[in-house]
Image: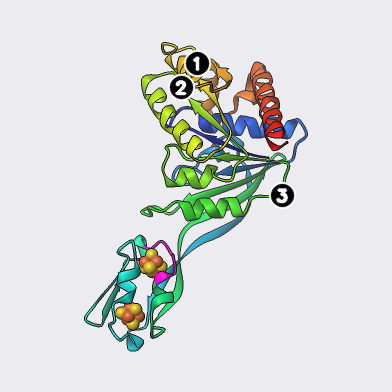
Amino acid sequence: MRIAVSSGKGGTGKTTVATNLAVTASRAGRSVGYLDCDVEEPNGAIFLKPRITETRPVNVSIPKVDLLKCNGCGQCGKICQYSAIIAMNKEVLVFPELCHGCAGCWLVCPTGAITESHRQTGQLELGLAGDVHCVGGLLNIGETMSPPVIAAVKEAAPAVDLLVFDSPPGTSCPVIESVRDSDFVLLVTEPTPFGLNDLKLAVEMVRALKLPFAVVINRADVGDGQTKRYCEHQRIDVLAEIPDDRQVAEAYSRGEMACDVIPKYRGLYGDLLTELEKRITAHDR
Ligand code: SF4
Ligand code: SF4
């Protein structure tokens, strides 16, 4: 089972839900993997505190040009959709940070002047937090393309009963890369006008991807009830409402998880896990 925990907006409690869910499932006897796909700001490890056993570079493909073989035909620049390679007067310029590694330029080059090379854009950290297998991705500072690092995190997923994807916030390419092959998407929101606006965008995204989904409302007792009314109107199930609890905020600020330090949250996350498993199983039939 692959559950993606996502949100249209940052700061809604997505990592709190993802880490508590992973630990709750592990304590209930499932073999669990936690994949931190929020590679621009991975912070699941602050709470899970995995013992890192391995690091791996994440490399992307880029072109390498041998000007001695170049005839100046300009085909490489014409095929590149990202202006990452430009040919002018037998001079070929490559802008590696714009390159998407699509291979178009070296496939189209008639003289074999372009070959595939690589550069590192991030790294993976693999480790264990209790019995939870953790894989975290980290995009190098200054890099803009996170999807290859997210794809590498998912490729490194352990063979377990349950994978929890902690996806980046928003609705753009990195989020789609994170959620697209999940069995269920849990959208975490907060009941504020900003939260509701971004929830609506996230709902549009998961509907376009045709993924089953439901909502968790964090800090549920603030706001004016518009988020719940929107979910009712759209027939979206709200699987849990997490109260605005000072104890949770204090645990968070200490890098601790609610399910570790506040007993009532073990039940809340246990019920959420049961509900998710029920829905995924029903959807698979
Ligand atoms: S690999 Fe693709 S994106 Fe990169 S320079 Fe070549 S054509 Fe452009
Ligand atoms: S396609 Fe190959 S030969 Fe043509 S300009 Fe580019 S590098 Fe040179």
> What residue does disc 3 label?
159
The quadrant where ligand 2 appears is bottom left
Identify the element where label 2 is drawn: loop
Residue, x 78% and y 34% (percent of image)?
29
For the residues labelled 1 and 3, say whether their Cβ atoms are less than 8 Å apart: no
Residue 56 covered by magenta stretch: no
- Displayed quadrant of residue 129: top right
The answer to whether the residue bearing label 1 lies less than 8 angstroms from the nearest atom of ligand 1 is: no
Amino acid of disc 2: Glu
Establish whether ligand 1 lies closer than 8 Å to the Cβ of label 3. Answer: no
Measured as percent of width and height from the top left, residue 49 is found at 60, 39
Q: Is 102 colored magenta in this rendering?
A: yes
Identify the magenta region: 99-104
Quarter of the picture containing the C terminus is: top right
Residue beneath label 1, please? 220
Separation of marks 1 and 2 at Cα, in angstroms: 7 Å
Relative height, residue 236 to residue 205 (above, below) = above
Q: Which mark is residue 190?
A: 2
Assess disc 2: are there few (<14), some (14-19) or many (≥20) residues with their C-alpha within 10 Å of its C-alpha.
Answer: many
| Image location of residue 245, percent across then percent down | 52, 15
> Which sits earlier in the primary sequence, circle 1 or circle 2?
2
Cα separation, mark 1 vs mark 3, equals: 35 Å
Question: Horizontally, is 53 left or right of 218 in the view?
Answer: right
**Residue at the spot x=60%, y=54% of the render?**
155
Report the side of 29 relative to 197 (left or right). right
Q: Are marks 2 and 3 in contact (CB under 8 Å)?
A: no
Label 2 to label 3: alpha-carbon separation? 33 Å
N-term-proximal mark, 2 vs 3: 3
User: Which badge, 1 or 3, comes first in the chain's sequence?
Assistant: 3
